Image (cartoon, grey):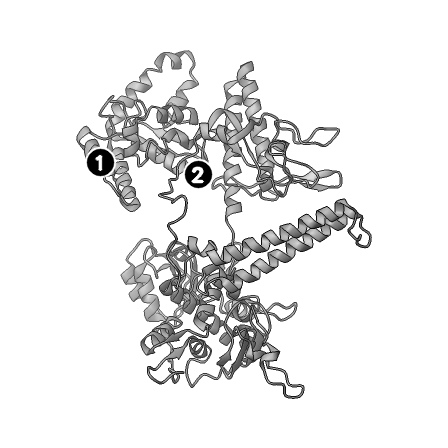
Amino acid sequence: MKESVSHQAPKVIKKLQFSLLSNQEAVKLAEFEVTHRDLYTPIDRLPVKNGVLDRRLGTTEKSAFCETCGLNSVDCVGHYAYIKLVVPVFHIGYFKHIIAMLQCICKTCARVLLEEPDRRSYLKRFRRPNLENLQRQTLCKAVLGLARKTVYCPYCSATNGVVKKAGALKIIHDKFRAKKTAEEMEKWKKTFGPAVEAQKELGMYINKAVHEDLNPLKVLDLFKRVSNEDCELLGLRPDHGRPEQFIWQYISVPPVAIRPSVAQDGASNEDDLTVKLTEIVFSNALIKQGLLKGAPTAQFMEQWEFLQLSVAMYINSELPGVPSQMGQKPIRGFCQRLKGKQGRFRDPNLRIDEVAVPERVAKVLTYPERVTAHNIDRLKKAVRNGCDVHPGANYVTAGSNGFKKYLKFGNRTAIADGLRIGDIVERHVIDGDIALFNRQPSLHKTEEARTEALELMSVKHNLVTPRNGEPVIAAIQDFITASFLLSRRDTFFDRRQFTQICSYFADADLQIDIPPPSIWKPVRLWTGKQIFNVLMRPNRHSRVFVNVESKCNKEEKPNVPEYPPVGHWRPAPDLSPNDGWLVIVNSEIMCGVMDKATVGSGKKKSVFGVIMRDYGPHEAAAAMNRVAKLCARYLANFGFSLGINDVIPGPVLSGKKDSMVEKAYAECEQLIIRAKKGLLENKPGCDQEQTLEAEISKVLSDVRGKVGNICMKELSRHNAPLIMATCGSK
């Protein structure tokens, strides 16, 4: 089994503390301030100094060197810069939190809107040691609920209303929303009397809804005035993050390595992040110039909004409320880079031809089902549930006259009782409905269309690629690891464990026949391979007899000298010492393991490929569903983790590695000495220097391969990275 983590390490990690990136940290991390929007010099096409491609940020060109560390593109880790914004902007990642905090504080004195007894009580609860995150969130919601009900600040008596989002990146304060503030609002409007008399057109603006615009500058000023005690009531720890850090003032510019330029025909294609950074620098410079020259307020506000939008799209380009530009390729912000789909088996509780949708979507998407003698009871129940309860219905159309009734209003019970055969009920989407989920979900409204989609576009009927007939759906990552762990030679289960694991791949709706045990005495034991026998052929009524002979992901060939010579006979591949050759006869595994080559690859000789070929898509899909459920549930109970000890070599391995590396370095020194004396025999087409480089590369490459082989032999068979490398899941 795994050894416990060694405590002889020179340092021990006590804890990890996450915090917000402060302005000081952003500047300290950076090498310089970005002030130029240009990328290259016009003549030499070299990166501009103090631009977003400055060589001090690193380089992606093979012939160039970083001007900060002096290393090439391979060895340089990259360096940061910063942009100092002339005016602050909202951080889109914290936008909801900013609104919540503004709701909690007074918009005049910046104190949390709690009476003193409540304030002390909540402070005490926030300061409890070992407070769980869930409890902290509950307390934050309670404080928000109390603050939302407070109209007049307990400390400065200022009026406070509802803070809400208005547009994609705008926050407003509806100050006089409460009914008790109506008189105060009238007094406030009267203060504009002289101005309205002088300029009549102002009256139409005053009579509109009174909203206070909370721009980033005003919000920053409020947040700076929040005390440390009040920060705790907002769910923050002042030592690690204060509210003003939720507002952008300094933007960190990442290294060039994560946003490389692609040279093409004397020009270059720039990364989306680089383009956005140049926009931010340009907008920032325009605002600075406008403030110095005294530009009109309308122009300044327009430029400020554009800067806010550019910074937000730099982080998240799929910003809700911001329409994408027609005819242009959508840009990818940081959020889009961190997202990614991969894998075929995602949710083990869903079949491969199923997709889960939120209940809210299921209530909006409806299917017009005609009432028959077979479904009338079910559709009556849906009509009684109505629009808001799933599974319900939204409309009923009478078959006799075509009159359509909306079920949001009216007596649904009477409508349900009056339902007749031939009527059409537009019911909510339920399990088993046919839908296309490509760009936007679309239901097939007729039986002909449903049948066409089911037969032509169903996932089951598209399991193989037309290019070469190989499966396009296979197991990945954890599913491969679990299959490998289950099917290893030394995996045994008693009857209780075996039946429990067999129940993982079904949902109590499948007859499973338990096979005879592999070991009868002294205890009846079943192997992990027999789990997969049952998975392929669950009971004697199943007609699925899988026959496969294939190489596993890591195959060790039998050592010929260890077998007695009999003519030209050679040992069969299924005598592989590491069980690296899979043989399945009539759905019974004779030898071999389930790994990437047998269940995880889209090959014709994989288990799924053979089932698809011999027994059709329905049996192949059923086998895939069973594997997904089995692996996810087994690994969740068995446990599989990566520890520090898994990646630290032991003393024996370290000793062998050091001796081999020292020997290789000594060989390289000898080669260098011989090259200096001109004693190296030149390789074809190479001079002494090139020959030396080739020889040194060969020696170092050989030692790397040998050390890798020693690792594979010396590491414990329970080592997690070794298991993943052997089965091919990583």
**Number of marks in the rendered image:** 2
Q: Is residue 528 above or below residue 242?
A: below
Q: Which residue is mark 2?
A: 93
Q: Are marks 1 and 2 in contact (CB under 8 Å)?
A: no
- Horizontal arrangement in the rendering, residue 622 relative to residue 180 (left or right): right
- Horizontal arrangement in the rendering, residue 156 relative to residue 7 (left or right): left
Of 285 and 408, nearer the camera is 285
Category of crowding for the residue at label 2, using alpha-carbon neighbours closer than 10 angstroms: few (below 14), some (14–19), many (at least 20): few
Of 439 and 465, nearer the camera is 465
Q: Is residue 718 above or below residue 81?
A: below
Q: Is residue 172 above or below residue 662?
A: above
Give percent across and percent down for residue 359: 37, 56
- The numbered dot on residue 586 is none
- Horizontal arrangement in the rendering, residue 48 relative to residue 89 (left or right): right
Give percent across and percent down for residue 439: 53, 54
Q: Residue at x 72, y 42 (%)?
A: 264
Q: Residue at x 33, y 81 (%)?
A: 523
Element on which disc 1 rests: helix
Give percent across and percent down for residue 202: 42, 18
Give percent across and percent down for residue 370: 41, 68
User: What kind of residue is marked 2?
Assistant: Gly
Q: Residue at x 41, y 36 (%)?
A: 95
Q: CA distance from mark 1 to mark 2?
A: 27 Å
Can you tell which quarter of the image residue 642 is in?
Answer: bottom left
User: What kind of residue is marked 1?
Assistant: Tyr
Residue 616 can be seen, yes or no = no
Q: Which residue is mark 1?
A: 122
Q: Residue at x 35, y 66 (%)?
A: 379
Residue 473 can be seen, yes or no = yes
Category of crowding for the residue at label 1, using alpha-carbon neighbours closer than 10 angstroms: few (below 14), some (14–19), many (at least 20): some
Query: Nearer the observer, disc 1 or disc 2?
Result: 1
Residue situated furthest right in the rendering:
685
